[in-house]
Image: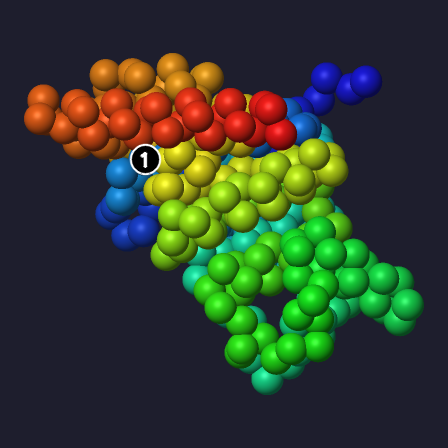
């Protein structure tokens, strides 16, 4: 088995005007990982995902995917070669059916046509739990199912690396576990996942490693619970004052329960 990481960044940086959003960012992601990213607003999380996905070019540094330098490759190229992204705000083609939405992704991002594209689209809908909605217009879906449709469209690119940008945002407490199980099943099928999320207990229920960003740099990384227990993370990311300790303890307990349920599933 190759020891080569699936994804690697070297001295990655991104500036917008005089604002340095990412700085000297070195990241290694192994195949099969579920890497969770947390951090305060403005920490550079979404910019990092955009740079990895190719929609934003880095100002400095390099990105390697399966050993190949993809720093200057476009988002379309990356989608066709194994890097897919699912965004926080679903933007389906509302005048198309659910199946047609995924078929477009299979044809263009997946670079398939005819029966092969159809088969991949159907399989992607099944993996996302949307088979029953195949012939419904995308405009009729509730938010949870629109988010699952976004994941299905990303899966239709047949990715080896899936980038998820706050896909649990806006969901009810009862709906979040549906997406958690979807991410868990996607990872179990062999897809490596990098997931940004503010719903921390959802993220840590499945993450194998957690990374906290601040000011475009890595503040802490490692075991999810150890990162959450870090005083620096509590202070910088969670903004914890002493009176907030009980609230954080409750969140940490929810994280532990979610991880235990995942282990026993």
The residue lying at 35 percent from left, 42 percent from top is: 198
Residue 80 appears in the figure: no
Quadrant position of the N terminus in the picture: top right
Q: Where 95 falls versus 10 (above or below)?
A: below
Q: Where 26 falls versus 155 (above or below)?
A: above
Instruction: Give the labeled residue for mark 1.
Output: 39
Query: Which quadrant would residue 24 be assigned to in this image?
Result: top left
The residue lying at 60 percent from left, 24 percent from top is: 264
Residue 224 placement (x, y as % from top left): 43, 22
Residue 61 placement (x, y as % from top left): 49, 35
Residue 130 appears in the figure: yes
> Which one is nearer the viewer's eye here, 18 or 144?
144
Quadrant position of the C terminus in the picture: top right
Residue 176 placement (x, y as % from top left): 46, 47
Q: Where 137 falls versus 193 (above or below)?
A: below
> Which secondary structure, mark 1?
loop
Query: Which quadrant would residue 251 be assigned to in this image?
Result: top left
Residue 185 placement (x, y as % from top left): 66, 40
């Amino acid at each position: 088995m190759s020891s080569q990481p699936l994804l690697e960044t070297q001295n990655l940086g991104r500036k917008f005007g005089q604002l340095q959003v990412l700085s000297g960012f070195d990241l290694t992601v192994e195949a099969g990982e579920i890497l969770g990213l947390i951090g305060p607003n403005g920490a550079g999380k979404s910019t990092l995902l955009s740079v990895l996905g190719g929609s934003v070019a880095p100002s400095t540094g390099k990105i390697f995917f399966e050993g190949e330098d993809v720093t200057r490759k476009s988002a379309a190229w990356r989608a066709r070669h194994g890097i897919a992204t699912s965004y926080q705000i679903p933007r389906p083609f509302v005048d198309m059916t659910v199946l047609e939405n995924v078929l477009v992704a299979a044809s263009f991002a997946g670079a398939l046509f005819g029966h092969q594209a159809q088969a991949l689209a159907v399989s992607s809908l099944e993996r996302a739990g949307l088979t029953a909605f195949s012939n419904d217009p995308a405009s009729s879906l509730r938010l949870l199912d629109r988010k699952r449709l976004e994941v299905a469209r990303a899966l239709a690119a047949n990715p080896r690396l899936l980038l998820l940008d706050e896909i649990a945002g806006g969901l009810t407490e009862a709906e979040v576990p549906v997406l958690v199980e979807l991410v868990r099943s996607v990872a179990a099928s062999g897809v490596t996942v990098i997931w940004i999320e503010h719903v921390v207990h959802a993220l840590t229920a499945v993450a194998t490693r957690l990374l906290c960003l601040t000011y475009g740099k890595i503040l802490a990384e490692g075991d999810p619970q150890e990162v959450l227990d870090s005083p620096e993370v509590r202070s910088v990311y969670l903004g914890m004052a002493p009176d907030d300790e009980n609230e954080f303890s409750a969140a940490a307990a929810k994280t532990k329960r979610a991880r235990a349920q995942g282990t026993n599933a």
